[in-house]
Amino acid sequence: MKRLLGLVVAALLLSSVNVFAAVNIKFAHGEPEKQSYGVFATMFAENLKKVSNGEMNCTVFPNGVVGSEMVAGQKVKQGTLQMAIVTAANAGSFSPCVNVLTFPYLFSGPEDIMGEKGYLRPGSAFREELAKRILADTGSMRLIAVGTNGFRLLFTKKPVTKMGDLKGIKLRLAASPVMQRTWETWGASAYAMAWSETFTAIQQGVMDAFECPTNILLYNGFYPYTNHVAENLYYCPQIFLILVNERWYQKLSPEQKGFLNEAAASNELEHFAWVQAEYDDVRKQLVNHGVEFHDITDVEQWKANAIALWPDFAEMSGGKEWVEGVMRFQKTGSFK
């Protein structure tokens, strides 16, 4: 009898350990720790530990050590990795509806992203619809947070101040059919290339140009090779998604899900403010490194040519109904 009682007590103790054991999350991204993605991941890990009183912890794997964004995203989809940052231009490979985030001139400025009425602000109608569609498309990827690294600018080896200057330029792009079609319409020779191959391609002259936010030009050391920036293009922000495996998420307790979602929401707004403050400092550092900033003189023509393409993107971006809904949302703030 005593032996049986001892076994019951041991089982209860073991059960208690399992219930209250800390949740350890592997969180992967492809950038240096001081770059925007790395800052977001570090902030999130700290926020999650704080709101959960240490019950939930993140181990962050930066610099693509888990693999490229596409590899990390695939691991999340398969359930072998709990969480990853995937740039919107790449996430469209998992869920075509995400490609709308790369539509040229969908966002007119930072406030359209995460401002008071921002499309991607936590709880917004646009954000909720996007998350629902990602889960439906993939069956296993849940959107828990969104971040931005500022707007994509054009970095080149020689100045670009008008559309005609793009002729003959070999431009590296992410694997986004929307972005590729946009740049080809403007006159560039656009090539999809893995981010891990981009530095060498620029350094060796295989590619002449690429487009990203300015902090990537600085922190990843591109500025000796592409030292001209078309500053007023602002055609598309670099948006990234924080995706978790749905099966893993559903195994969390309601309280743990609450911790995760609370940390994500507060982190998004904190990080957005950091990105806004960082731009001026990065620009000054680039100027000190000899980078020259130029304005495009015919930017309205770039904008008109690009927006005219939107209906053509429907098939590759979640379908006509979704794209038309996005167009309505841009005009009215509603999908209806």
Image (cartoon, rainbow, N blue to C red):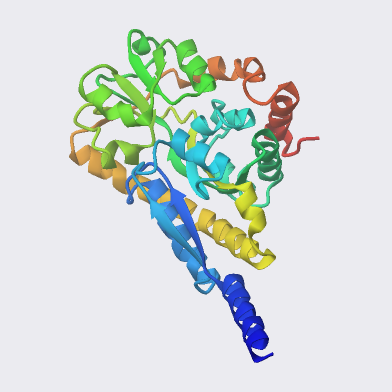
Most extreme residue toward the right, as rendered? 336
Q: Position of residue 74 (x, y in %)?
A: 51, 36
Which quadrant of the structure image shows residue 289? top left
Left or right of 288? Residue 148 is: right
Q: How many marks?
A: 0
Q: Nearer the viewer, residue 214 or 143?
A: 143
- What residue appears at the point 67 percent right and 26 percent down from the top-left corner? 318
Left or right of 166? Residue 242 is: right
Q: Position of residue 265 (x, y in %)?
A: 58, 57
- What residue appears at the point 33 percent right and 8 percent down from the top-left corner? 168
Answer whether residue 329 is visible to the viewer in this image. Answer: yes
- What residue appears at the point 36 percent right and 13 percent down from the top-left corner? 166
Left or right of 211? Residue 327 is: right
Q: Position of residue 9 (x, y in %)?
A: 63, 84
Q: Nearer the viewer, residue 229 or 180?
A: 180
Answer whether residue 116 is visible to the viewer in this image. Answer: no
Q: Nearer the viewer, residue 134 or 181?
A: 134
Q: Position of residue 97 (x, y in %)?
A: 64, 30
Name the image quarter holding the C terminus: top right
Eyeballing the image, is 57 above or below 77? below
